[in-house]
């Protein structure tokens, strides 16, 4: 979600500190996993916003250089198990589509947990996931015309 291993480590540390300080606020209305994931998800969004704000403060020349560095960091920190064509297809997806796929297949959240994290209904979560998978398949097939199926099964 963040695109940088170092930023992800910082978010992880921040999440554990926040959970430690707010554990008394956990009300058992949802699974602990869902509550924890929501904290991490919000911290990731804040971190991305912070990175985006910093990026806009850069000069025009600095922006190009920072973007290249960030893209190189993304490529270096990507999961080695994913093939380059899958990574390319994931990068071509919209941010919301990418997040839904990551929640389901990397973080292992159930559809209900995804709905809780995103504050949407279960049917809306299902629809987002299936639309994201359809878009992934379309993009993947365009970037990998050999036709190797890499779409995860729901």
Image (cartoon, rainbow, N blue to C red):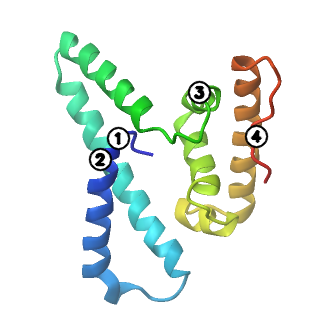
Identify the mark nearer the N-term, 3 or 1.
1
- Of 149 and 95, nearer the camera is 149
Report helix, strand or loop for mark 3.
helix
Q: Residue at x 40, y 62 (%)?
A: 40
**In the rendering, which numbered label is found on residue 4?**
1
The residue that disc 3 covers is 84
- Of 10 and 77, nearer the camera is 77
Report helix, strand or loop for mark 4.
loop
Image x and y of residue 129, in percent: 70, 49
Identify the mark nearer the N-term, 2 or 4.
2
- For disc 2, the neighbor class at 10 Å (few under 14, some 14 to 19, many from 20) is some
Q: Which dot, 3 or 1, sits closer to the camera?
A: 3
Disc 2/disc 1 C-alpha distance (Å): 5 Å
Identify the mark nearer the N-term, 3 or 2.
2
- Of 84 and 40, nearer the camera is 84
**In the rendering, which numbered label is found on residue 7?**
2
Disc 2/disc 4 C-alpha distance (Å): 28 Å
């Amino acid at each position: 979600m963040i695109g940088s291993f170092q930023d992800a480590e910082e978010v992880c540390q921040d999440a554990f500190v926040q959970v430690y300080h707010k554990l008394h606020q956990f009300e058992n209305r949802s699974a602990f996993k869902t509550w924890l994931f929501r904290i991490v998800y919000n911290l990731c969004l804040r971190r991305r916003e912070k990175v985006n704000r910093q990026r806009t403060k850069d000069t025009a020349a600095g922006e190009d250089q920072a973007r290249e560095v960030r893209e190189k960091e993304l490529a270096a920190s990507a999961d080695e198990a994913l093939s380059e064509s899958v990574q390319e297809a994931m990068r071509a997806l919209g941010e919301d589509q990418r997040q839904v796929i990551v929640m389901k297949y990397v973080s292992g959240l159930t559809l209900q947990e995804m709905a809780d994290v995103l504050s949407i209904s279960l049917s809306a979560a299902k629809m987002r996931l299936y639309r994201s998978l359809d878009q992934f398949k379309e993009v993947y097939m365009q970037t990998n015309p050999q036709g190797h199926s890499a779409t995860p099964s729901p």
